[in-house]
Image (cartoon, helix red, strand yellow):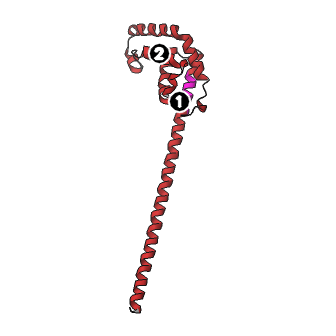
Amino acid sequence: MSETVLYILILVFTILSVGLAFFVWKKSTELKIKRQKQEASIQAHAIAAQEQKDYLIDSIRIISRSIYDGQCPMAEGCIRLKVLIDNYAPQLHQQPELQVVELMYSKTSHIPTLEAWKRLSSKEKIPFQEQLNSLEQQYSDEIRKAALFLKDYAFDKRVH
């Protein structure tokens, strides 16, 4: 083999080696950037999930305090608590103290809410209001116990 061919082969392999090294460096840089973006996305989702969890806990505590202090209608508070607990930790409904929340929700599920309530005439609202008052009187002790339970519940010690 002549020296010229040998130098050409050395040059070709050198160029290939440099090209391959550049390709590997570029791919590893892209992979590193992709990994960083994924980690940032995971962290952002974790922060958002924690904020949502904190919002639910705060809302549950505020409504519980309002019920306990008599600042919120008991039936309305139970309906709101049911939805919040469903979003926070549905298994929390299995606590004996919170059975009344499920009960009130099921006994009031037929009553129109929000816009449907607003569309009712005053006369149409009367039977529903009487029913709500009756339920609140019947279950007031249990509802206050549930509110006290949730007001003081150690949400931060719970493990999901």
Residue 5: x %, y % from top left = 38, 89
The N terminus lies in quadrant? bottom left
Residue 139: x, y in percent? 52, 10
Residue under the image location 39 percent in, 92 percent down:
2
Q: Amino acid at mark 2?
A: Leu
Answer with the quarter of the image where residue 154 lies. top right
Residue placed at 51% from the left, 35% from the top?
Answer: 52
The residue drawn where x is 43% and y is 68% is: 23
The residue stretch that appears in magenta = 54-63
Question: Element type at marker 1?
Answer: helix
Q: Number of callouts in the render?
A: 2
Q: Which residue is mark 1?
A: 56
Q: Position of residue 126 (x, y in %)?
A: 42, 7
Q: Main secondary structure of the magenta part?
A: helix
User: Tag 1 or tag 2, which sits nearer the N-term?
Assistant: 1
Few, some or many residues within 10 Å of mark 1 (<14, 14–19, 20+): some
Other-residue count near label 2 (Cα within 10 Å), few / some / many at <14 / 14–19 / ≥20:
some
Residue type, mark 1 in image: Leu
Q: Which mark is residue 15?
A: none
The label nearer to you, 2 versus 1, is 2
Frontmost residue, 133 versus 1: 1
Mark 2–mark 1 Cα distance, whole angstroms, equals 21 Å
**Residue, far bottom:** 2
| Residue denoted by label 2 | 103
Q: Secondary structure at mark 2?
A: helix
